[in-house]
Image (cartoon, grey):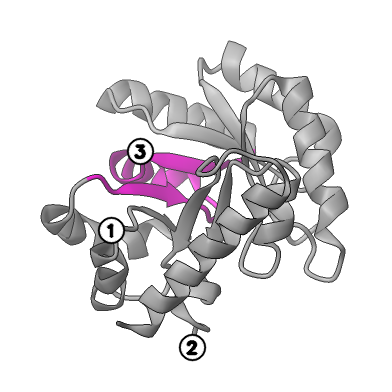
Amino acid sequence: MSTAVENLLAVRKAIAKAEAETNRREGSVTLVAVSKTFDAAEIRPVLDAGQRVFGENRVQEAQSKWPGLREDYTGIELHLIGPLQSNKSEDAVALFDVIETVDREKIAAALAGEMKKQNRFPKLYVQVNTGSEPQKAGIEPKEAVAFVERCRTVHGLAIEGLMCIPPADENPGPHFALLEKIAQEAGVEKLSMGMSGDYETAVGFGATSVRVGSAIFGSRT
């Protein structure tokens, strides 16, 4: 058994434990295995172990791996979890099943146009910059509810979730709580929050999916 597969099983076990400890239904949290920077050969053992939901940061990198992997494995759900440039929206709509990083009007408009053109409708999440970090993508928390509404009414987008990446040097709990509060106000059900260092905490705050990379695949070079 490869190290990545052993790690995958350990992460699944930890998620199940966190679900039980917070009185959540077993299996209510989806594990998104973040495979960015790892090549197809390194991903295959994890696919062989039954994992089917993966996250990638860059459209171009994902294009180099996933079409081939999809020929060999059924049921793959691919999430874009990195910032999206409007000029990559065509490729993103064609490749990804979930786009978690809708964070500005230009992206919303570009995605709406491409989805209609391609007749392909990935699930969409709005990324919220819960820490208001200037270097980080995401809509400001105070603008998030109105932005979700504009996505729906102006662009005709069905926003089903919110995503956040808390500041690395802060307790993630308050950020997860804030995202859950915004989700309730905006009327969205899905919460993508929690990464390798804090995914168990995120489960306790209502995460419906957690994005775990290094705890499965190891540190990136």
* Cα distance between the residues tagged 2 and 1: 20 Å
Give the residue displayed 25% in from the left and 58% down from the top: 66
| Residue at numbered disc 1 | 63
Residue 162, x across and y down, in percent = 64, 37
In which quadrant is the N terminus drawn?
bottom left
Residue 173, x across and y down, in percent = 83, 54
| Residue at numbered disc 2 | 221
Question: Which amino acid type is shown beneath numbered disc 1?
Answer: Gln
| Residue at numbered disc 3 | 93
Give the side of residue 45 with respect to residue 174, left or right: left
SS assignment at label 3: helix
Residue 125: quadrant of the picture = top right
Reply yes or no: does residue 99 show up in magenta: yes
* Cα distance between the residues tagged 2 and 3: 29 Å
Give the side of residue 99 with respect to residue 170, left or right: left
Label whose residue precedes the other's in the sequence (2 or 3): 3
Residue 181: numbered disc: none
Give the side of residue 169 with respect to residue 161, left or right: right
* Cα distance between the residues tagged 1 and 3: 12 Å
Reply yes or no: does residue 117 show up in magenta: no
- The span picked out in magenta is 75-103
